[in-house]
Amino acid sequence: MTTPAGRRVLDTASELFYAHGITAVGVAGIAEAAGVTKKTLYDSFGSKAALVTAYLQRRHDRWWAYLQERLAVSPGVGTVFDTYLAHPDFSTARGCAFQHAAAELPPDHPGFAVIRAHKEAVRGELERLTGDPDRAEYLFLLLEGAVARRAFEGTPDALERAKALAGA
Amino acid sequence: MTTPAGRRVLDTASELFYAHGITAVGVAGIAEAAGVTKKTLYDSFGSKAALVTAYLQRRHDRWWAYLQERLAVSPGVGTVFDTYLAHPDFSTARGCAFQHAAAELPPDHPGFAVIRAHKEAVRGELERLTGDPDRAEYLFLLLEGAVARRAFEGTPDALERAKALAGA
DNA sequence: AGCCTGCTTGACCGATCGGTATACAGTCAA
DNA sequence: TTGACTGTATACCGATCGGTCAAGCAGGCT
């Protein structure tokens, strides 16, 4: 999975999964777009489910690292909202990859645990930042709502507005 | 589409689409589960995209009618939150069908317009109830967030909490 | 009668699904 | 030099995808 070809597969799969959905994207298409054989894909990941899980896990890891980076510079709830807008590594124009994945994957899919862990991590971070579980819950709902809007709205306005509300 | 067989198709498709996702459910499976031939399905709806659109449209129509019914009895923002919990006609245990559909469908899918219209209708209703666009926006984000949580959480607690927050 | 509609059975289309198999070439370390 | 590792190409597996087609049968309409 750490071989060059494996990395290319994961990069390509990540783009395609996010852009078109997980079920709609086939392994053959991923392999072809990555310039790799299906054999190599299966040597690296073993199954589509494992590839999907790796996609979600890495997406969380990268986003989380970026969040911590930004929080170190300017700690505060607003930074969490901003990070959803500013992540340079991948587009968020279609909304939250984890919300989308939760819509597609059955609850027993190995990737579903990654989704739950990601959301709980974000909520936990808000709790850590505010020191108030109730307020964290409130901010989390606001954040989820704003991110959900991005899925059917073209503009990130909702996130800006949510951030403003979070300040109040 | 108003024939008995057509209705059975739409009923069955609605259950399957909501339970397993749109892309993951095939027309052959729908037809079989409805006790109907693929021919009949295509005579009634013409294409899978049209069937998906009909599914979303009817889901909106029914939910909307139910919401208006309940608002007539007890007008207020809290009723909108409750209606997400109480709709008897279909399960909401997996979260919002429209959020899920938005995750799966390409933006140019005919069903996508139904999604946008539904969400805008809900937001508009909140605006009508509050008479305050900013507060409506805030409540809508809270509602979307709470409903999104249902997709990866087993319990409807988030909706209860969101309703409590909406009162404050 | 005759015809139209609603629905059936069942076969068929090309394409794609996730996944496996065989065979071969290059690179690197022991 | 001999492997093990990483990768290629290609063909294959059974199943399913969305969609179409030919033929036939029931019941209600005029």
Image (cartoon, coloured by chain):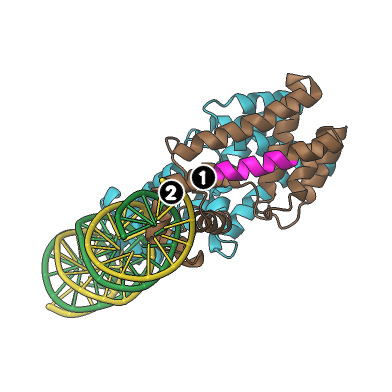
Chain colours: A brown, B cyan, C yellow, D green
> Is A84 left or right of B60, judged from the image as shown?
right
Q: Earlier in the sequence, mark 1 or mark 2?
A: 2
- Looking at the picture, which amino acid does disc 2 mark? Phe
Number of the label disc, if any, that sits on residue A54: 1
Rendered residue at 62%/41% (across/down)? A60
Give the amino acid type for the residue marked by disc 1 in the picture: Ala
Residue drawn 37% across the image and 59% down it? A39
Question: Which residue is denoted by mark 2 in the rendering?
Answer: A45
Label 1 close to label 2 by CB (< 8 Å): yes
**Foreground of the two, A153 or A3:** A3
Q: CA distance from mark 1 to mark 2?
A: 9 Å
Q: Quadrant of the C terminus of chain B?
A: top right
Residue D10 placement: quadrant: bottom left
Residue B16 visible in the shown view: yes
Q: Residue B96 or A122: which is nearer the viewer?
A: A122
Question: Which segment did they paint magenta?
Answer: A56-66
Dot 2: what SS?
A: helix
Q: Can residue B132 be seen by looking at this rendering? A: no
Near mark 2 (Cα within 10 A), the count class, few <14, some 14-19 or many ≥20, is: some
Horizontal relation, residue C17 to residue B101: left or right: left
Q: Is residue A38 left or right of residue A119?
A: left
Report the quarter where the N terminus of chain B lies.
bottom left
Q: Give the image location of residue B6, x and y in percent.
A: 35, 56
